[in-house]
Image (cartoon, coloured by chain):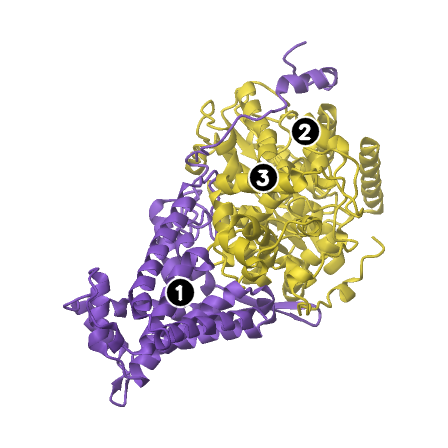
Amino acid sequence: MNALLSLVAVIVLILIAFIGIKVASLHFLFGVVIPYAAIATFLIGVIYRVVKWGRTPVPFRIPTTCGQQKSLPWIKQSKLDNPSSTSGVIGRMLLEVFLFRSLFSNTKFELKEGPKIAYGSTKWLWLGGLAFHWSFFVVLVRHVRLFTEPVPSFLHSIEVLDGFLQVGALGVLISGVVLLLAVTYLFLRRVFIPEVRYISLAADYFPLFLIMSVALSGILMRYFLRVDLVSIKELTMGLASFSVAVSLEKISVIFYIHLFLVSALFAYIPFSKIMHMGGVFLSPTRNLANNSRMERHINPWNYPVKVHTYEEYEDDFREIMKDAGIPVEKE
Amino acid sequence: MSKTPKADELSKIDYMPPKSGWMDTPVEFKQGFWCYGSKAKSLETVGFPNPRQWSPADEDWKLPENWQEIVLKGFKERLDKYRSFKVFMDICVRCGACADKCHFFIGSGDPKNMPVLRAELLRSVYRGNFTKAGKILGKLAGARELTYPVLKEWWYYFFQCTECRRCSVFCPYGIDTAEITMMARELLNLLGLNTDWISGPAANCYMKGNHLGLEPHAITGNIEYMLDDIESITGIRIKPTFNRKGAEILFVVPSGDLFADPGTYTTMGELMLFHELGLDYTWSTYASEGGNFGFFTSNEMAKRLNSKIYAEAKRLGVKWIIGGECGHMWRVLHQYMDTWNGPADFLEAPKSPITGTVFENAKSTKMVHIAEFTADLIRHGKLKLDPRRNDHLKVTFHDSCNTSRGMGILEEPRYIIKNVCSHFYEMDENTIREKTFCCGSGSGLNASENIELRMRGGLPRANAVKDVVEKYGVNMLANICAIDRAALPPLMDYWVPGVGVTGVHELVANALVMKGEKERTTNLRGEPLPGVVETREERRKREDRRKEVGRRRKREEG
């Protein structure tokens, strides 16, 4: 049900763009106004969210320690999994952000007769997630060529690497294909793994369908439907320099659909779980060093509390304490 | 108790989620899964809101009229005070990596015991009240209203989480359900919705210094009994001191170890070790609790209870502090104490008077874990040990949740065990160290009325023990946690009968060759040492002593 609703939502988005161009001829709206609005929403929204997180205090030093602490000099510390220094934390974060290290150690369990519980490594989610995020990143970087003239040389290198599979006359770029496959995998596991299906919200399916449709429309445009690349580049350069001067009608509808879906995705990000990309850097269980006995961590809102003092305690038990031979302050 | 299913029956678990969505599946309070509600008196003692007689089984929980307002205001306040809470409410992508990492999910199959869904119970209300998408799109955005059934669902499931943090290890963003459960329990606490098993000990600890409510003479008395036992086993009379000013070290243990087997054997071990070293240390009856059940109610209450340790260290003028074997106690001491009640600038950086080692890792908090202290002693060859006395034991080690995932003390206890025992075997690597499984009874869930929940939650741990029992003949489960020592014996009896439970310092003391000791014939439990044949007379004496100890304890409890 959640999946279906999300799919319908994405189809509606596609139809809006299609009708907007084909029927209403709102080229300027879809080619210029909406992309700007989307980028503005994205930037302001993301900054707002991250600043809001950043301004929320971290009262306690609560890293999740996943290895041996630093203690006695002859005991080997796990410097990455239980870092006690900033460099260790940076290492831990880099591995987490770039390689999804926690997911790499994922396990699955099986309850057998006996009962006997067996644990095994499972790497599919890690692999799928990694493929998804990295291919998305490469696709995004490739699009920088639309906004630069001359195109920076590193982009050429990326494209050469990305296109090492030559299929027919077309240089097939692997990143796009991997993105589509990975996002499809992420969708299928959500549908077919019962626990994951049970926890999935419409807000989980919607971005998957949206990204799937972005990738599909991009692939269609690149390999199957002819688009006027020169005009597109003129438009994107115009957008980048705030001076759009191309005749927008020359560009075919598939481009506008692609652009509208991308706009929707960018505008949606600040309101959605996709914010995890910023949040992962601010997670106190991962980005803090485990040094709370070495250096005092300050809680900005620490306040005095009512306690039961020793004096009150002794008043309650003075006679008992004396009888038990325990020294007291007041005889 | 009688209703608890047998082990073979209980281990038939269905993991298929129900047909109806989780928001549409109402909470059902199953017998054996929940703890009794807090007593009015306990709440009054510490000044908690809404003290009254109530039962979770009642339809009406006697809440204040504006309870929704109270909860939502408290929610907002905590979102603004804790980045962890705010970020964890926002960034979960529901990838499901945590789903099968929770011992309660593995043991119950209840989908609301998947960490992600446990958190969603709170997140759904967060979205409905504090996010734009949730306010506009409602259920589509995974949002819902805070209703009475939702509140009850919170109560039921946030007291089915032991704050063990295992899910946080596997989460790609480190989302820690312990943080979320702590916040949820704070919110429930605002309405007086705590459990008796937690609020009772917290109130005891506030007034009397320890969870069990042991008054000064009961503490000295209990230790006196232990000293009698030590004398009859070793021939040595130990004379510890209490509340002594000018001692070098203050020693704080979880009070459970002063009260019940097998924790008391751990305390006996510590007494023997410190005596042998000639350590200048003192016990305190005021700071007679290292554990902190306040931690399971609210941050503020935890701080109030914890304050006694530094206050007492200051009053007595000690130089530094050693803490005993306990799990959540060390989470609190390691990650919270200095921030709450520091700086402990009246103390000195801990330095072992025996080896001269300065514990750099505790130079600010000035509190050292006894396993760190003892490992250092052994490393420097300061203890005369005869591991053969433990030769009848095949030992495995259970890492406690808090000390492994909220501190990282993994090698120290292993090093000690390997030096005092000849036979040590690790459990499955997926069930130890940072991946260790909870005993099923942590964070104040070790009551008796929720025994089925505890046995279910303890299944993964017990099952990993069973595996090493079958492979290596393991017969002793060592640990460094007082709740483990209380919770694991019934868990073992239920799933893996025949496996004993011990603290690490009990093993140390059994192997420890003390100056001037007589030839030992029994271990601290009064059982014959390996190679020693017990005469009928000795056996009778041992059993009599056990019975006598039992009677004594009953008298004190009464």
Q: Nearer the viewer, residue A140 or B405?
A: A140
Work out whether residue B161 can be spotted. Answer: yes
Tags 1 and 3 on a common chain: no
In the displayed structure image, the side of residue B426 where residue A207 appears, left or right: left
Marks 2,1: beta carbons within 8 A? no
Name the image quarter holding the C terminus of chain B: top right
Amino acid type of the residue tagged 3 in the rendering: Gly
Q: Position of residue B136 (x, y in %)?
A: 53, 56
Q: CA distance from mark 1 to mark 3?
A: 35 Å
Q: CA distance from mark 2 to mark 1?
A: 53 Å
Chain of the residue that carries numbered disc 1 in the rendered image = A
For label 3, the crowd category at 10 Å Cα-Cα, with few meaning under 14, some 14 to 19 and many 20 or more, is: some
Chain A takes which shade in the image? purple
Amino acid type of the residue tagged 2 in the rendering: Val
- Which residue is tagged 1? A264
For label 2, the crowd category at 10 Å Cα-Cα, with few meaning under 14, some 14 to 19 and many 20 or more, is: many
Work out whether residue B213 can be spotted. Answer: no
Q: CA distance from mark 2 to mark 3?
A: 19 Å
What number is the disc on residue B46? 2
Q: Which chain is yellow?
A: B
Q: Position of residue A234 (x, y in %)?
A: 20, 70
Q: Is residue B246 above or below residue B541?
A: above
Nearest to viewer (mark 1 / mark 3) = 1
Q: Secondary structure at mark 3?
A: helix
Tags 2 and 3 on a common chain: yes
